[in-house]
Image: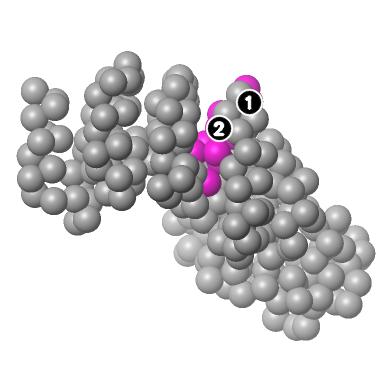
Amino acid sequence: MQAMPERWTPETYNDFLAELKQEADEAYRLFNEKLLASELPTLGLRLPFLRKTAKAIAKGDPNGFLAVCGKTYHEERLLYGLVAAELPYADFLPHSDKMAKFLVENWAICDTFCSSLKKVLSHKADKAHYFRYISVYLSSLNPWTVRVWLIVMLHHYLTPTTINTVLTRTLAVDSDFYYVRMAQAWLLAEAWVKFPEETKKAVLAADLDPWVFRKFVQKARESRRVSDEDKEYLKSLLS
């Protein structure tokens, strides 16, 4: 791609979008459409290319880009989240809300955004603040917002200081939305890997939905980081 514009306007953004379309891979677009099961059209751009593009944007005028970034295509929303994650923490917060409440429309946008926050949460005080800040996402009526909370916890807050709170809140989630339930199971499986005793105690004491429980056991037993002994124990819980 050509160099990023010094200042983003609707016109320069449209030129940028036209360049993105020239980089698209039609075979990958068709594959992605089936994988995502999303209502958003997709261009067919691979994630490494989008990450590289986001970093290039962030070196110039990231706020200008975010002000004009479209939301029609899957990749536009991915870029919005990736560029936002390059901002200083205080500037990032309103963009986190926009992603969680309005722009996350499928599991790939959710998980890519949530897994890309290591830099913006690199300072201990900011990370602690964000843990408190996004607790309101759990009470959202938008299930994708709830999934954002779960996947952020999975990637960034399975730590000694937050594990018990994360487990308590995760086990309290009650949703019939498939992608929330899968995120619950995935988070609990990851928690078992890192904190097996704490997770065991919390899960056994909870009234966890049977479907989520089975998926949690399945995902934990599929992990190479869970001991054979623990896998047998988890299997016994299903009988």
Q: Which residue lies at the image location 55% right of the left edge and 32% below the top edge?
A: 146
Residue closer to the observer: 161 or 232: 161
Q: How many marks?
A: 2
The N terminus sits in image quarter: bottom right
The reply to whether the magenta stretch includes residue 1 is no
Q: Farthest residue in the bottom direction?
A: 2
Q: Secondary structure at mark 1?
A: loop
Magenta region: 140-152
Residue 213 sits above or below residue 195 on the image: above
In the figure, is residue 188 to the left or right of 103? left
Asked where in the image residue 203 lies, by quadrant, the reply is top left
Q: Secondary structure at mark 2?
A: helix
Q: Which residue lies at the image location 25% right of the left edge and 42% below the top edge?
A: 196
Residue pointed to by mark 1: 140
Residue 5 sits above or below residue 236 on the image: below
Q: Amino acid at mark 2?
A: Val
Residue 215 x/y as whole percent: 27, 33
Residue pointed to by mark 2: 146
Q: Is residue 103 visible?
A: no
Circle 2/circle 1 CB separation < 8 Å: yes
Residue closer to the observer: 102 or 210: 210
Type of secondary structure dominating the magenta stretch:
helix
Residue 110 x/y as whole percent: 55, 46
Q: Amino acid at mark 1?
A: Ser
Residue 40 x/y as whole percent: 62, 44
The reply to whether the magenta stretch includes residue 145 is yes
